[in-house]
Amino acid sequence: MDISRKEILRYLGYRGKPADEVVANSIESCLAELLRVISPKCIYQIFPVTFGENHLVTIGSISIQSKNLSQHINGCKEAAIFAATLGAQTDLLIQKYNKLDMSKAVILQACAATVIEAYCDEQQDFIKEEAGKQGLYLRPRFSPGYGDFPLTYQKDLLGVLNCQKRIGLTVMDSLILAPSKSVTAVIGLTEESTTCHIARCMTCQAKNCPFRKEE
């Protein structure tokens, strides 16, 4: 798994600025401790896609009203519903340092956010290889909460994959995933060649997001 220190710094608000030696050492220490406790798991399933009126997208048995998702996977006949998690021990580690050392907890949060994205990218590369055998290409993953894709669909995505039983992933009444360092997403499969299947920020409409990756 390729874990970018630059990404960790971006989550910490360093956008393009180098960290001093103390912060850099803290990142390495926190990352090492985090990697000892994570238990990453991933699951996905491919479903047919149909498009209806008023930006209605149906993926398998799930019907989603979202202009942004509809545009994002426009032209795709299939899509993968995807879920991944770093496991419950990640949350417990962060909670521990929330009580003992708040600065370390903040760095652990940034490390965990980077690690779950790196893990998702790694798993998406595997999906890319499998899709390529059928002459298909991937669109970047698109998660509930992006644009007008409501978080309320978290429950549907988890349910269709039976995530609670298979990878221990659930969603709370607040629509927050548990464990928190987890991802759900839709990944369009298309016959049209695409240059990058993981460029999430480049497809997001939140141009002024402080955590946006630099182009």
Image (cartoon, grey):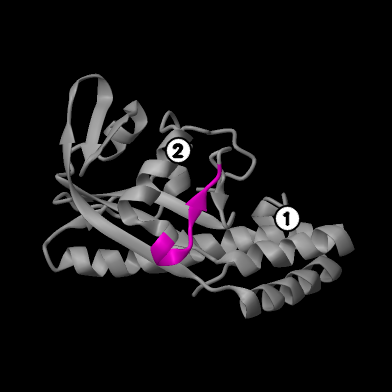
Amino acid type indicated by mark 1:
Lys
Dot 1 or dot 2: first in sequence order is 1
Above or below — where is 1 with respect to 62?
Answer: below
**Residue range (magenta):** 165-172
Residue found at x 47% / y 53%: 183
Q: Which residue lies furthest to the top in this view?
A: 54
In the figure, residue 28 lies in which quadrant?
A: bottom right
3D distance between C-alphas at marks 1 and 2? 23 Å
Q: Which residue lies furthest to the left in this view?
A: 134
Q: Which mark is residue 204?
A: 2
At horizontal 83% and vertical 71% (from top left) the residue drawn is 21
Q: In which quarter of the image is residue 66?
A: top left
Percent of width and height locating residue 205: 46, 32
In the structure shown, which secondary structural element does the residue marked by tag 2 occupy? Answer: loop
Say whether residue 167 is magenta.
yes
Task: Confirm whether residue 162 shows in the render.
Answer: yes
Residue 18 percent location from the top left of the image = 74, 61
